[in-house]
């Protein structure tokens, strides 16, 4: 059952460790019975989906129920009306859980910690932390024993890592009171296809850091900080494909904000309006990262990047194909491509001063190193498709890594030499990829290619 990997399954895994029980708020699957029990026993509780970051807050006070959402609230005088509204207007497509709120919730300080491990046998390390909420000042750093906190986080991650061995990046949200007691209020698993997990896997290799755009989890604070630092940023869902949900946000000369998705742009007059829009339409539905925008080199005014195919050959990673994707008119990513080119031709058309040999050698070196690092997280991986960007200064960037890349991009180029080499290498590895040429065009598509 897929749900076992969601919040309810993670809670069940954590409950097996007796040391963690007192730090776990009560949780149950959402049902009419459990909803009524929560109303009878608690003044405040949360309703969350198994997977996404959406959060519904239910407050019972003075014989009135208030249901609070990201974009507003509703008031009810009876629990029957509240329940009917939730199941008919809100909770129609997902499975939800009910979660208790730790005592004295108004005085608690919340913080999210990201823990990462290099492989299933490696130890967990805290690689990132951030305060939750704009105005509260976290007191986690005032704990008398930071060692106790770090070890608690590592123990929690170890329990989840044992139950979910494919996962190498975990976000743990803790709530802490003034006396130093804390509760595990949320856990989120980021597996190999998560951009947040990929970022930490690649950033852990020192020689790759200069090729990775600055990245953070997207919150109100991180979005504000990134816009101040870079003026142009990209928001990407941690789990996504084909460019769906990717947004570019820019600070304009008049200090308004431009939101650019696909080939559509809109203006927000101030940051409050911007974040309300971003939160309502994106952050409340999926976990997102915010990333510095790379000003890619262009051909005919449209940005382009390079799809680099990296494949395992015995115990070594080799590059078997490179193709340039030129973005369509008014698009800022190449997921919607106007044309495909060989790298040498693209460099000539763009006027980039990099020579083909220099460009290819650098991209191959980066992708081989990145492949070896990502393969430590996923021992069954034998092919990775990298999107590599070349900026206007000739610098090279790792934009993204895909574990199920499309091979059809390489058809009809270079007498099909790259296409055939990729396919033959796939057949040689035979690790979960069941590919065959189609009748029309003999295009190869691996499982759920992107």
Image (spheres, grey):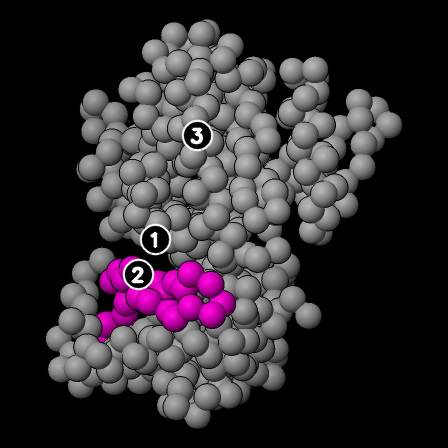
| Nearest to N terminus: mark 3 or mark 2 | 2
**Mark 2, secondary structure of its residue:** strand
Q: Residue 192 placed where, x, y %?
A: 52, 55
Disc 3 target residue:
363
Contact between marks 2 and 1 (CB within 8 A): the answer is: yes
Instruction: Please tell me whether mark 2 or mark 1 is closer to you in this view.
Output: 1
In magenta stretch: residue 115 = yes
Q: What separation in Å lies between label 3 and label 2 (alpha carbons)? A: 27 Å
Q: Residue 109 placed where, x, y %?
A: 23, 72
Q: Residue 248 placed where, x, y %?
A: 38, 33
Q: What separation in Å lies between label 3 and label 1 (alpha carbons)? A: 19 Å
Q: Going 86% across and 27% down the picture, which residue do you hit?
A: 439
Q: What's drawn in magenta, residue-wise? A: 107-132
Q: Going 70% across and 20% down the picture, which residue do you hit?
A: 416
Q: What separation in Å lies between label 2 and label 1 (alpha carbons)? A: 9 Å
The image quadrant where one finds the C terminus is top right
Instruction: Sort mark 2 into few (<14), some (14-19) or many (20+) by Cα contacts within 10 Å.
Output: few
Disc 1 target residue:
204
In this view, the residue in front, 136 or 291, is 291
Looking at the picture, does residue 99 appear above or below residue 400?
below
In this view, the residue in front, 106 or 108, is 108
Residue 135 shows in this picture: yes
Disc 2 target residue:
127
In magenta stretch: residue 303 = no
Q: Quadrant of residue 116?
A: bottom left
Q: Residue 181 placed where, x, y %?
A: 25, 85
Q: Going 66% across and 17% down the picture, which residue do you hit?
A: 413
Badge number at residue 374: none
* Left or right, residue 268 beside residue 310: left
Instruction: Please tell me whether mark 3 or mark 2 is closer to you in this view.
Output: 3
Instruction: Sort mark 3 into few (<14), some (14-19) or many (20+) by Cα contacts within 10 Å.
Output: many
């Amino acid at each position: 059952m897929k749900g076992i990997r969601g919040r309810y399954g993670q809670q069940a895994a954590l409950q097996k460790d007796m040391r963690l029980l007192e730090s776990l708020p009560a949780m149950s699957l959402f049902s009419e019975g459990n909803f009524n029990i929560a109303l009878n026993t608690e003044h405040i509780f949360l309703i969350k989906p198994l997977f996404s970051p959406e959060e519904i807050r239910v407050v019972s006070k003075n014989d009135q129920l208030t249901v609070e959402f990201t974009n507003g609230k509703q008031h009810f005088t009876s629990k029957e009306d509240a329940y009917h509204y939730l199941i008919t207007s809100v909770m129609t497509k997902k499975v939800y859980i009910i979660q208790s709120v730790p005592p004295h919730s108004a005085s608690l300080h919340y913080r999210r910690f990201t823990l990462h491990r290099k492989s299933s046998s490696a130890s967990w390390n805290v690689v990132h932390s951030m305060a939750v909420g704009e105005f509260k000042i976290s007191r986690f750093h005032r704990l008398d024993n930071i060692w106790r906190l770090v070890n608690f986080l590592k123990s929690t991650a170890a329990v989840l890592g044992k139950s979910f061995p494919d996962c190498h990046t975990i976000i743990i949200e803790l709530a802490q009171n003034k006396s130093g007691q804390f509760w595990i209020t949320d856990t989120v698993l980021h597996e190999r296809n998560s951009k947040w997990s990929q970022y930490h896997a690649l950033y852990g290799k020192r020689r790759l850091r200069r090729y990775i755009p600055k990245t953070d989890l997207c919150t109100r604070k991180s979005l504000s900080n990134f816009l101040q630092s870079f003026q142009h940023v990209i928001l990407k869902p941690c789990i996504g494909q084909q460019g769906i949900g990717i947004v570019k946000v820019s600070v304009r000369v008049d200090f308004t904000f431009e939101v650019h998705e696909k080939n559509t742009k809109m203006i927000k007059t101030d940051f409050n309006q911007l974040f309300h829009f971003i939160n309502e339409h994106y952050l409340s539905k999926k976990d997102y990262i915010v990333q510095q925008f790379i000003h890619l080199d262009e051909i005919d005014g449209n940005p382009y990047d390079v799809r680099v195919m990296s494949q395992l050959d015995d115990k070594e990673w080799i590059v078997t194909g490179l193709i340039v994707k030129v973005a369509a008119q008014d698009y800022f990513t190449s997921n919607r491509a106007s044309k495909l080119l060989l790298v040498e031709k693209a460099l000539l058309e763009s006027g980039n001063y990099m020579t083909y040999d220099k460009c290819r050698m650098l991209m191959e070196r980066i992708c081989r190193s990145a492949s070896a690092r990502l393969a430590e997280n996923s021992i069954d991986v034998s092919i990775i498709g990298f999107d590599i960007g070349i900026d206007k200064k000739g610098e090279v960037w790792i934009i993204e890594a895909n574990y199920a890349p499309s091979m059809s991009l390489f058809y009809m180029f270079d007498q099909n030499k790259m296409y055939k080499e990729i396919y033959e290498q796939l057949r040689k590895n035979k690790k979960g990829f069941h590919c065959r040429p189609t009748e029309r065009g003999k295009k190869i598509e691996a499982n759920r290619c992107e």
